Image (spheres, helix red, strand yellow):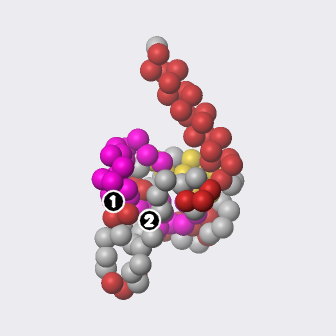
Amino acid sequence: MKEIGFDDVYICPHQHTEGCECRKPNPGMLHQAATENELNLSNCIVIGDRWSDILAANRAGCKKILVLTGAGNDALHKYRHKWSNIEADFIANNFEDAIRYIIKSVGNSEMNMEH
């Protein structure tokens, strides 16, 4: 992923049964990224296709975009009960749709800040 332009990649090496803080839906990797890169997580967006991505983003205070590709359709329907008290900020058909939404949102935020 670094070869295509990502600054950092965070991967949890633990099994689900180990109870670590870095395995999603725990927000440990997001907190690590925030610390290492001086990020304010409330200004960050998590794009994911799994219910655990949405839960981790919510627990870290990030904005949440669910993409329906990959496991996204199951996350929205089959596993919706796992995040039933959370709303995604946007449900995208695919990654490109998510990026268009972000670009549009940033543009709208900048316009609102000017007024």
Is label 1 in a helix, a strand or a loop?
A: helix
Seen as rendered, the residue at the extreme top is: 115
Tell me the quarter of the image containing the N terminus.
bottom right
Is residue 106 positioned above or below 40 on the image?
Answer: above
Residue 43 at what x, y percent from top left?
41, 41
In this figure, which residue is indicated by the disc labeled 1? 32
Along the line of sight, which residue is nearer the eye, 93 or 78? Answer: 93
Neighbour tally class for label 2: few under 14, some 14-19, many 20 plus, Cα within 10 Å: few
Task: Specify whether 20 is left or right of 99.
Answer: left
Q: Residue at x 48, y 62 (%)?
A: 9
In this figure, which residue is indicated by the disc labeled 2? 10
Does residue 77 appear in the picture of this structure?
A: no
Asked whether disc 1 touches disc 2, contact meaning CB atoms under 8 Å apart, the reply is yes
Along the line of sight, which residue is nearer the eye, 4 or 91? Answer: 4
Is label 2 in a helix, a strand or a loop?
A: loop
Magenta residues span 30-56
- In which quadrant of the rendered view does residue 47 lie? bottom right
Q: Residue at x 42, y 62 (%)?
A: 55
**Gap between marks 1 and 2, in whole Å?**
9 Å
- In which quadrant of the rendered view does residue 77 lie? bottom right
Task: Specify whether 51 is left or right of 67.
Answer: left
Q: Amino acid at mark 2?
A: Tyr
- Mark 2 or mark 1, which is nearer the start of the sequence? 2
Q: Residue at x 58, y 53 (%)?
A: 5
Residue 32 at what x, y percent from top left?
33, 59
Along the line of sight, which residue is nearer the eye, 83 or 56? Answer: 56
Residue 97 marker: none
- Residue 40 falls within the magenta-colored stretch: yes
